[in-house]
Image (spheres, rainbow, N blue to C red):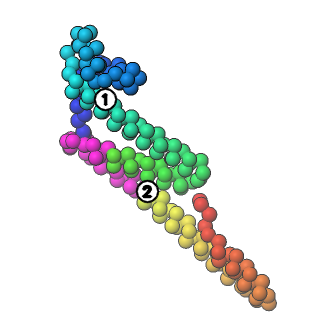
Amino acid sequence: MGKMSRTKVELLGLLERVVRMYNEDHMTIEDIEGALRGEGYDISRESIRKTVKKNRTIARELEKARTETEALINTIRSNPATDVNEATADFLIAKVFDFTKQIDAVDFKDLPELADFVRKITKVKTDIVKQRMDYRKVYERAKDDILLELQKALEARPELYEQIFTVVSAMEAPCE
C-alpha cells in the first residue's frame, strides 16, 4: 500500500539513540550530528531533522490513539450491548480513514482486501443502526399495546388512565 521512506538514521539503527539524544539529553540537531560523526557515522543534519520531525508526528499519533482507546474503553464501561459494537466500529472506521489518507501509491493486489474490510465494517455499522431502530420500534409498539389494554381495563377510571398514560407516554427505550 503506502510506502514509508526510511531515514539514514533508521537505516543505520540509530533511531532510539537520536530520539533519546534529542528528547532526553536536549541536544540540538547540530550537536547530535557532531557526536555521531565523531563516532564515524556518515550522517547529515537533514536526516537527523527528518527523524526528529517524524518522531514528533509518531508521538502525536500515539497520543491520539491513546486518547481514542481511552474513550472507547470508557464507552464500553458505561454502555452495554450495541453501543460497544458501534463504538468499536466507529473506531475502526476512523483508523481505516486515517490509513487511507497516508497511501502514497496503490497496490492493486492489496486494494480488494482494503475494500472488503471497509465493506464489512460499514455493514456492521449499518446493522447496528438498523438493530437499534428496530428495537425502538418494538419498544414503542409495546408501549402502545400496553396503553390500549390499560384504557380498556380502566374505562371506569379515566383519571387514573390519564395519569398512567402521561407516565408511560414519556418513557423512552432504555439503552440496549
| Vertical order, 56 against 79 (above or below) | above
Q: Quadrant of residue 150?
A: bottom right
Q: Quadrant of residue 113?
A: top left
**Mark 2: secondary structure:** helix
Q: Which secondary structure is most common in the magenta stretch?
A: helix
Query: Mark 2 = which residue?
Result: 125
Disc 2 or disc 1, which is closer to the eye? 1
Which amino acid does the dot numbered 1 rest on? Val
Relative image position of residue 126 (x, y in whole percent): 42, 60
Relative image position of residue 149 (x, y in whole percent): 70, 81
Q: Residue furthest top?
A: 39
Query: Mark 1 = which residue?
Result: 52
Relative image position of residue 38 (x, y in whole percent): 25, 10
Label 1 packing within 10 angstroms: few (<14), some (14-19), many (20+): some
Give 151 or 90, whichever is nearer the viewer: 90
Q: Quadrant of the C terminus?
A: bottom right
Write down the region rendered in magenta.
Answer: 99-125
